[in-house]
Amino acid sequence: MLTNQELATMTVRNVIFHDVPNQRGDGGTGVVLATVPTRIDAPRRRLLTEKLTKVLDSRSAYGIMFAPGTSSPVPNEVRNYTTQAYRETTFVGMSQRLATHLHQVQNRTISPGLLCVIDLVVAGRHGLVIMKLEREEGAQLELDRSDGKTQFAMSVLQNLVLTGGTKLFKTAAFLRSGPGDDDFNMSACDSQHRVLDSTEMARFWLSYLGCTVEEDARVTTSKFFNATLEFANNTVTDLADRTHIYESLNTELRSNKRNVVPRDFVRDFIPEGLQRACLDFLEERHVPMRTFDKDVQDVKSALRRLTFTSEAGVRVSVPEGQDELVAVDEARIIVNDRLRTVGRS
Amino acid sequence: MTDVEEARGRWITERPAFIEFSIELEKQLQRLVSELGISAQVSVRAKEVYSLVKKLIAKRHLNYASVTDKVGARIVVRYRSELPRVQKLVCERFRVDKIEDTSGRLSIDKVGYQGLHIDGLAFFPDGEFGKKFPLDTFFAELQVRTLSQHLWSEISHDSFYKNDDTLQKVPADLRRRVHLMAGQVEVADREFERMNSEDPQIPAVQIFKSLEPPYYMLTAEKPNIEVSMEVIDALLPLYREQDVQHVSSHILERAKASEEMFRHVYSAPENLSTEAAAFLFQPEALMIYDCLLIDRDETVRQWNQKFPTEELERVAVLFGISLQ
């Protein structure tokens, strides 16, 4: 999710609206695509930034991630757009494609409305916000069609977004955190529906975005821990390498670092020849490759180990809660377990 | 043409460039004071044309080139202990010709004007502004004083008792009263310093004082201390019986970790308008941020007992926090 600090330092660069009615099939009014961003003054730009913060940090906001194998073009649009420097023509073109896609998937059960696309920047990192605004019945949308352009007026922003009081909108924010396909901090908000409801209306927003709800940090941390251990146990044959992976994994998760980057972990601690296989294995186990917040709650006991060290430097390390595996008397440390493997490091 | 007339004409021509220099110098001195985390008034001014004329008339031994305070800068701090800190940083960041501590002029049985005078304050030639404002032309005279020293300086400047020459001409009894007054100002100055360094053993005051340095690193805006005391008292229960030192450390650590965000918030022009969030310009803004991240609901609950919710919402949203 976007952090408080990211929201506080966010700068809105440009805003564009497109009118996206439902597909009528009767030759009625179609989608109205703006060709020029809406002009906004400084006070409204500030109010918009504040509104985005209120929405994206609200209780109805949740973390999202790009859904693997989605048919929605939104993830790739977001990926491509945010790797480039800002250009108005690129911004307009990308937003028009997002509106066209919304029009294609929005059937009669979904409320028609306006799609608002916002270009933003946070500490030099490029980002994008997509907002779906419901169009009040009979509401007039001020549209300027002079000089061959199509441009929604600032009053649209004022009336539909800024004067909504505490109203929350269907919103999604994507902020680059690195150059990779999944290197984003992402948040979404959908006030009308519980996000995990299975109804079509509840799923519509995420399905349009091509995203899924980001799993809890506890779950991700646990998946990363278990998958890495599984890979080490089943694929890494050299005992020294395996021990190194165990120790590194333990250190990584017990460190004061707040995040884990699996891709970096693989690069730093998995033997070079096995790195590709490890990445594939983690992906197969649905471990995200990008940064995730660390929460070791579910693996805490597995990380805690009791270590016995002899005078000569022999170390015996026991998982927490299994102290009975080791007996210590005055002259000996006895391990009550069967030998599984031996290696030289 | 007289020397004064020539100097007048030259200053009219050259003054705009010195105004530019003053503006940049003031920014740099303000930044320097912020780095120290102290509250201080910083001002830099290029002399008015008429002031230069009057100076040249009053001090006939001077000419255009030898007037060293064509640009005058001043830093007024609150406490005496802040003077050496300012002096040290000024000497690190600027090229200076001469530093004089005027209290050194006074023997131990004399009282009178005190303060630091720094002559020939200029940008280093190899720095960003050194090329634009070469030090052989663009330099200023900087005075660094406490508020009490400033009071004495300002009052004496407007009277006949400014220096020993004029003072010698007044009757002995009046002269004695001038010295007594100067002594009282110095006693007040020293007493303010002592009071500031003494611990009043009041939790809200202790927390407030710990928040002042990081706050003044972000802004020079003066807070309302009565409001600060009330807010700190209202939010303290969120720290569940922790001692004051722990509370302060918690807030300061969080502020340090969010330093970049705070710098952004306190420098964004849109946040500095007259409509700015009232609690942004209070040192306890750092505590409000910490409390909102500790327990948003409880912070709102405590806040609402005494203060308007809208004001909390206004400051929270600037810190990227929604109360919705």
Image (spheres, coloured by chain):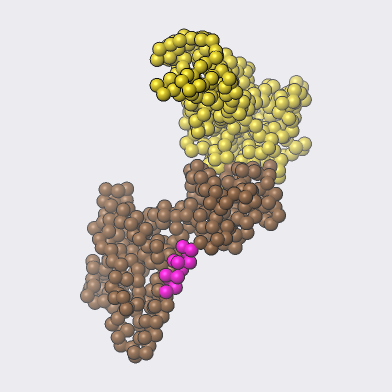
Chain colours: A yellow, B brown
Q: Is residue A37 visible?
A: no
Q: Looking at the rendering, in which quadrant would you find the C terminus of chain B?
A: top right
Residue B189 is a magenta residue: yes
Which of the 4 quarters of the picture holds residue B317? top right
Vertical relation: B83 (above or below) B276? below
Residue at left offset 57%, top offset 13%: A284
Residue at left offset 66%, top offset 48%: B299
Residue B91: horizontal and vertical position, in percent? 30, 56
Vertical relation: B273 (above or below) A33? below
Q: Looking at the rendering, in which quadrant would you find the N terminus of chain B?
A: bottom left
Q: Which residues are magenta?
A: B187-198
Residue B203: horizontal and vertical position, in percent? 58, 57
Residue A59: horizontal and vertical position, in percent? 68, 37
Q: Main secondary structure of the magenta part?
A: helix
Which of the 4 quarters of the picture holds residue B50? bottom left
Work out whether residue A115 or residue A150 is closer to the camera in this orientation and state it: A115
Q: Is residue B175 visible?
A: yes
* Left or right of residue A252, residue B89 in this image: left
Which of the 4 quarters of the picture holds residue B73? bottom left
Residue at left offset 54%, top offset 57%: B206
Vertical relation: A166 (above or below) A112? below
* Left or right of residue B34, residue B3 in this image: left
Work out whether residue B254 or residue B242 is closer to the camera in this orientation and state it: B242
Work out whether residue A319 or residue B198 is closer to the camera in this orientation and state it: A319
Work out whether residue B205 or residue B176 is closer to the camera in this orientation and state it: B205
Residue farthest to the front?
A: A330
Residue A262: horizontal and vertical position, in percent? 51, 22
Residue B62 is a magenta residue: no
